[in-house]
Amino acid sequence: MVQKLITLKTRLENADQYHADIAKRSQQAEEIIKGLTERNETMVADLTIRRKEEADFRNRMEQTDQSFRKAADALNARSSLFNERNIRFIQLQNKVKAFEQEIQFRNQQMEEAQKSLLADQEAEANAVTESKTVAEEREQVQSQLLVSYEDKKTREANLTGAEQDYFQARGQINELESALRQLNKNRHDAQILVNELKDNFNNIRLELTSIGERIKVEFQASIQEIIQREPNPDLDPDLLEQQVTRLKSRLENYGEVNPMAVEAYREMKERYDTIDQQRQDILKAKSSLLQTIEEIEATATTQFMVAFDQVRENFIEVFRSLFTEDDTADLILDEPDKPLDSNIQIIAKPKGKRPQSINQLSGGEKTLTATALLFALYLLKPAPFCIFDEVDAPLDDSNIEKFNRIIQKFSDHSQFIIVTHNKLTMASVDVLYGVYMREQGISAVTPVDFRTYEHNAVMEQVQ
């Protein structure tokens, strides 16, 4: 109420100031009209005199124009002659500069040629000195070369004798190497024969060992006992041969025995045990994970339903505070059994309307419904700041008052920053920040704190 009184008082003061400004401007306009009338009469009289002076001036100007044209023609002729001579002078001046540059270039070339000539003369003198030195060195080298030729002939004669002795010794060495190679070949053949005999001996020993082990396994007797045992005269060799043949056929029907079967079985058994243990671990982890998922879903569902019920109650309350107590609003889950995966229907039915969808509401009703849902979520977890950017643009005056009331209701818990062009919203705020352009392209902000005016008004009423 105090704020409305302040607003009305401000409007009255602005109206009085406006009427005073209009009266002052009317008085100033009358004085300006009176002054302009006096100046007009003076200017009419002055204009008559100026027109006479203009006629005399035109006559003098016509005479002056004729003299000026003659002087201008003469000046043009002189200017053309001056320009031609000036162009000629500039051309000659350019030629002189070109000749000077050419002379300077020639002088530089002559200086460089003289320097090159001096360098060539010095090089020629050095070359003559070097040629003399080279000639002396050549004579010394020729004399040394003759002495070296004599020494070469002597050494070649000695070399011929040494080569003969070398070839004789080389022949003897070749004969000895041939005999040595033959001996090595014989030794190698003997070594091969010895190795073959050793291999045969080892094979026979292995066969004997294998036969002994087989006899020991099959007949529980050692090979030494069989060798020392006397043959049984009652046994028929033909019958024994038939029995041996029959047993061999049975062994052949069994197929080859895999000596690594036991080891392979052990490896496969170990792998099977490992895989079975891993399978058991995976099944246990799956069971534990499913249990954890169920617990998380149960907890999330419980928390979601608690939050949903709270938001639903807040939405109904805020919607009715924005509209009327008879209006209907609700939030409904499409799949109550699966709340986490369910869609949410927003029901908004102002009094006198039965819309099938929210799109059938007006712009202001949509805005108020969205504001109600926003504040319903806000009440679940309030924030210290809340910013609205021209949300009151589609609202009419009555709806703006509802919007301002709910903002004032929740302003005790949070600070609201509203961007608006509506005068009613501006009048209901605590602090107003006006943006204006102090200079072209430069914006500035001016704050107006209504709380100060409200405090002053209360103090005046108390006094």
Image (spheres, rainbow, N blue to C red):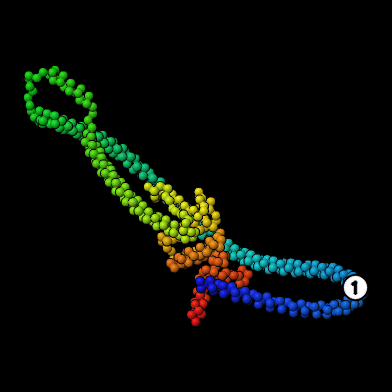
Locate residue 198 relative to residue 56 in the image: left or right: left
Q: Report whether residue 447 is seen.
A: no
Q: How crowded is mark 1: few (under 14 residues within 10 Å), some or many (20 or more)?
A: few
Q: Which of 453 and 236 is in front in this view?
A: 453
Residue 139 in the image, given as x and y percentages of width and height: 53, 59
Classify mark 1: helix, strand or loop.
helix
For the point 39% across and 50% down, the residue is: 340
Would you place residue 13 above or below residue 247 in this image? Answer: below
Residue 274, picture quadrant: top left
Residue 259, picture quadrant: top left
Would you place residue 331 above or below residue 52 in this image? Answer: above
For disc 1, the marked residue is 65
Q: Which of 158 and 435 is in front in this view?
A: 435
Locate residue 17 relative to residue 229 in the image: left or right: right
Q: Looking at the picture, which amino acid does disc 1 mark?
A: Asp
Q: Which of 159 and 447 is in front in this view?
A: 447
Q: Nearer the viewer, residue 212 or 292?
A: 292
Q: Report whether residue 23 is seen.
A: yes
For the point 30% across and 49% down, the residue is: 291
Residue 28, picture quadrant: bottom right
For the point 21% across and 36% down, the residue is: 262
Locate residue 326 relative to residue 248 in the image: left or right: right
In the displayed orientation, state which residue is furthest to the bottom: 463
Q: What is the total number of numbered labels drawn onto the structure image?
A: 1
Residue 376 in the image, given as x and y percentages of width and height: 44, 59
Residue 54 in the image, given as x and y percentages of width and height: 88, 76
Locate residue 142 relative to residue 14 in the image: left or right: left
Would you place residue 158 above or below residue 422 in this image? Answer: above
For the point 55% across and 54% down, the residue is: 362
Residue 145 in the image, given as x and y percentages of width and height: 49, 55
